[in-house]
Image (cartoon, helix red, strand yellow):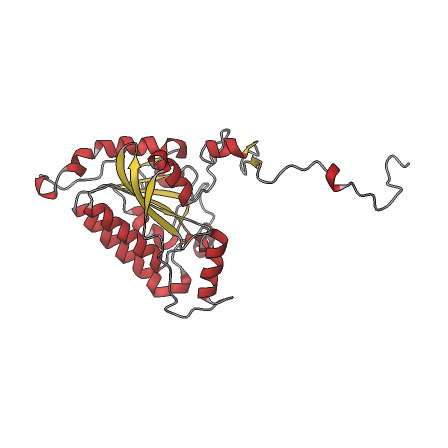
Amino acid sequence: MAWFKRVEKGIVTPTDQKKETPDGLWHKCPECKTVVTMAEHKRHRCVCGSCTHHDRIDAADYFEFLFDDGQFTELDANLTSGDPLRFVDTKEYPKRLVATEHNTGLKDAVRTAHGLSTGQPLVVAAMDFKFIGGSMGSVVGEKIARAIDYARQNRTPFLMISRSGGARMMEAGYSLMQMAKTSAKLALLSEAGVPYVSLLTDPTTGGVTASFAMLGDFNIAEPGALIGFAGPRVIKETIGKDLPKGFQSAEFVLEHGFLDFIVDRRELKQRLADLLGMLQPVVAAAPGQREARRTPIKAH
């Protein structure tokens, strides 16, 4: 019976004889379970080649493929949050910020930059979910507001890539003020006739959805992104009813008229180029030369 039952105890294979696969070499799709090399997965912009599931990526990844040759100039890179409320939960807010910055290498939950995308100037603000859930604090609102100002002053189209759990509770009212500030800045951008494209990625919720994320001249999304204000569980508990299948998915939101179109990440750069190319005469014209205010063009 020794074939089926270990007789000797404590048998250990020498370390130099172990056959181990290095971490990070393979990627398994969480949806269809297809396994590919990490190099191939990244080559496809972290989109599954079998089921088109879109994994979350960071602001740096968007900058790398949206800007030509990955070249860009970052705006306000060193802005950091203060602690106006002296907030403490399981740890003090400043200590949480320091720890998160150490773990992620980020200063806050958004990065802003400008450069050329398919030869056209573009300003991009991209949120990072790994920094306290992409929550919107005073620095997030300020950096987005400054990026909008840069776009308006230089008459450069503005792309906002949202990925957030909503307002940052550690800053309470200061966080909620960013909704009004960013919305007011976008109103000025609209008055100047500069296009604003809002890309909603997984997840886009809370105060971000209730402000700048849904104010684009074009509101677009990645496939399967969760888009909403309150989460599905909270809504179900509030109304006491089961929610429709796929509720708050990008496809559901598109069907109900809140999005212009859904775009595969691998096609995003070219779709943006086509979209902004249609609006180029409007961007180039000075405000006094326009006969009428630009109105959103619905593209389905």
What residue occupies the far right of the structure in this picture?
1
Q: Quadrant of the N terminus?
A: top right
| Residue 180 percent location from the top left of the image | 27, 57
What residue occupies the far top of the structure in this picture?
50
Q: Quadrant of residue 19?
A: top right
Task: State the residue at coordinates (75%, 37%).
Answer: 17
Q: In the figure, is residue 63 to the left or right of 152? A: right
| Residue 63 percent location from the top left of the image | 37, 41
Q: Foreground: 272 or 74? A: 74
Q: In the figure, is residue 59 to the left or right of 156? A: right
Q: Foreground: 20 or 273? A: 20
Query: Can residue 275 be seen here?
Result: yes
Task: State the residue at coordinates (46%, 61%).
Answer: 98
Query: Can residue 211 be seen here?
Result: no
| Residue 54 percent location from the top left of the image | 46, 37
Q: Foreground: 113 or 243? A: 113
Vertical placement of 259 versus 50: above or below?
below
Q: Quadrant of the C terminus?
A: top left
Give the number of marks: 0
What residue occupies the far front of the structure in this picture?
16
Task: State the residue at coordinates (86%, 41%).
Answer: 6
| Residue 93 percent location from the top left of the image | 45, 65
Vertical placement of 114 versus 181: above or below?
above
